[in-house]
Image (tube, rainbow, N blue to C red):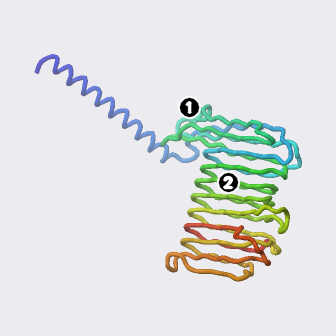
Amino acid sequence: MSKTTCAIVAAITVVLVLACAVACLAVVGVIAYFDADAGDRAQVREAIVSEVAVESPATLTVRNPAGSVTIRTGPQDDRIVVEATTEADSVFGRQAERLADQVDVRIEEEGAGARVEVDLPEASEIGFARVNLVITVPENTHLDVVNEAGHVRIQGTEGDIRVRSEAGNLRIEDVTVSRSCDVMNTAGSITFEGQLPEPGVGDEPWEVLLRTEAGNIDLAVPANSRFTLDAESEAGSVNSKFELDDPQSGSVRGEVGEWLKGSVNGSQANPNVILRTESGNIRVTPLQ
């Protein structure tokens, strides 16, 4: 074998050895991350608080890739207060710090309200980051929330509500809907407790639309609410504690799923409470 050939073979051997070593280190890192106890992992937490002056009725737009979102009402009617807590988790301390440094939380004025937008670094096998938001708003606030992964909780608002989520439970409680409540989830339950628009107020139709692909839907409204129900589960049960006028019901996919339609308290409207789940149970009850 010539010297040139020997040199080439030696170089290839060195490259292969280095590649194997790098692969082994990566595997060791992944194993260490998943085998490590929570106390052994490095976590960085950073919190900021910011205020935005708003008008009434206010608007709030939220865009968050990962983390929890809690929206609650406060005594102030002229500002929105945002508490954003960044959490970066990794088996390596410096990696957690780098992840935290790459998180970008923007809190800005937008029209008569505020916009909160979060950018996160790409997650990997050994580390990830998320931002948990606690936002205090005036009672009269319209909401537009997109939270891709994490629980969402909305409390006490009066206005329109729009929520989109890929994974996480959505809980909407003690709210008053003005004209529209449009909630869509991919994996997680939806709970709605609150006031529907008053019958006969205004000429425009209103709608509450709750949809999830995998999860239960629970809707509770005052006993004197007037609405027309259209509920369907492709794999689960549908039950209403309200007495329905001219009820219609049936099964979906044989006996796997159920659907239920009917008006409540003399409603003459087209279906305006629409509930859909592909896999889960639907329950409609009067508020206690």
Position in image of residue 277 (x %, y %)? 59, 67
Does residue 25 sit above or below 267 in this rendering? above
**Label 2 Cα neighbours within 10 Å, binned few <14 / some 14-19 / many ≥20:** some
| Place of residue 16 in the rendered image (x, y in percent of width and height, measured from the top left) | 28, 30
Q: Quadrant of residue 209?
A: bottom right
Tell me the element at label 2.
strand
Q: Quadrant of residue 62?
A: top right
Disc 1 target residue? 94
Residue type beneath disc 1: Arg
Indicate the position of residue 17 as horizontal and vertical percent values. Answer: 29, 30
Q: Which mark is residue 138?
A: none
Mark 1 is surrounded, within 10 Å at the Cα level, by few (under 14), some (14 to 19) or many (20 or more) other residues, namely few
Please state which of residues 16 and 247 is positioned toward the viewer in this rendering.
Answer: 247
Residue at 72%, 38% in the rendered image: 47
Residue 134: percent from the left, percent from the top?
Answer: 74, 47
Outermost residue, front side? 203
Task: Identify the residue shown where x is 42% and y is 40%.
Answer: 28
Q: Is residue 170 above or below residue 274?
A: above
Nearest the viewer among 221 and 18 is 221
In the rendered view, does 157 fall on the left or right side of 62?
Answer: right
For residue 239, above or below residue 62: below
For marks 1 and 2, the one nearer the N-term is 1
Q: Is residue 38 left or right of residue 190?
A: left
Residue 55: quadrant of the picture: top right
In the rendered image, which residue does mark 2 sit on?
163
Q: Secondary structure at mark 1?
A: helix
